Amino acid sequence: MPELPEVHNFKLYFDAAATGQTIASVTVHDDFIIRNMPGAVFIDSLTGRTIVDTLRRGKYLFANLDNGHALLLHFGMTGDLNLYQEPEDRHKFERFALHFADGNTLGFNDPRKFARILYLEDRDAYIDEIKLGPDALDLDLDTWLETVSNRKSTIKGLLLNQSILAGVGNLYADEICYRTRIHPAARACDLSREQLTAIHAETMAVMQYGVDNAPYYKDYPEDWFWHVWREEGKPGPEGIGEVKITKVAGRTTYYVAGWQSGHE
């Protein structure tokens, strides 16, 4: 599922394809993923609008329009973008497409239809409504420590809590815990200030590396984070411990028993 670094990659793609473009027309093949209006209204709302710029906040990508409104793209598990000119290059799972005045078309593909597309008249009000926290790359250490220090929640649950920090998902949360040698099920209130500081530092490091290297979530490099260690039964670092699978915060979780501590 696309998380902060992957959505950053989508932002780069969208910016190159769509920023400054006027939407000449819109095609909706399936309006299931358009969550707050019928397809016909969606078409009318976007036609003739110019895309001014974009904002990424966590896993959310907002395309800001010339009338002060915004188009929200939340990619779900299988959302993708496809810029093309010829009709035969349209993806078979394209759900809607923006046809630009320059002759290019930007299609939004989603085989499993878990994406969430919204037309927003007030972007900031929507961000407040869903209680979307600061972007994971913008969360300062003092705010992080103040927010989580006495919480009884698991550290993985807090990393996944989008109202605390936006952008970290299941895979990256496991990676952050692995790097700090802290068990994902450890309770934040049981961790030291140094451990919580280490969690914050590795969150910044992992997210920044991901952004700098702009991964495409369907084709990660062989050495990408979890490809190195995230395999059940594999020995841990330096031969210490073994990779195991459990459930934490309702999510499938990989960790190295005997290497990561803080939970019995």
Image (cartoon, rainbow, N blue to C red):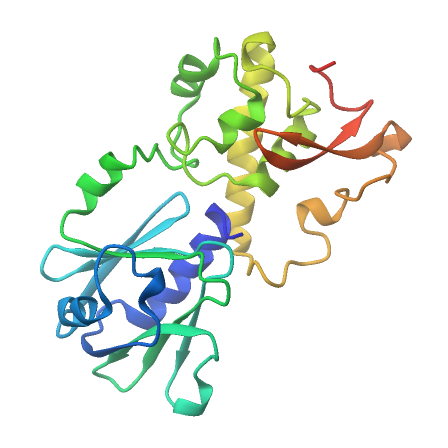
- Tell me if residue 211 comes above or below residue 246 in the rendering: below
* Left or right: 79, with 219 as reference point: left
Horizontal and vertical percent position of residue 68: 11, 55
- Tell me if residue 104 comes above or below residue 211 in the rendering: below
Q: How many marks?
A: 0
Horizontal and vertical percent position of residue 18: 29, 70
Which residue is pictured at 60% across the width and 11% down the height? Answer: 191
Which residue lies most toward the right here? 239
The foreground one among 249 and 62 is 249
In the figure, residue 231 lies in which quadrant? top right
Which residue lies most toward the left here? 67
Which residue is pictured at 67% across the width and 58% down the height? Answer: 221
- Tell me if residue 233 comes above or below residue 36 in the rendering: above
- Tell me if residue 9 comes above or below residue 146 in the rendering: below
Horizontal and vertical percent position of residue 190: 60, 8
* Left or right: 50, with 79 as reference point: left
Horizontal and vertical percent position of residue 3: 49, 47
Which residue is pictured at 45% across the width and 30% down the height? Answer: 161
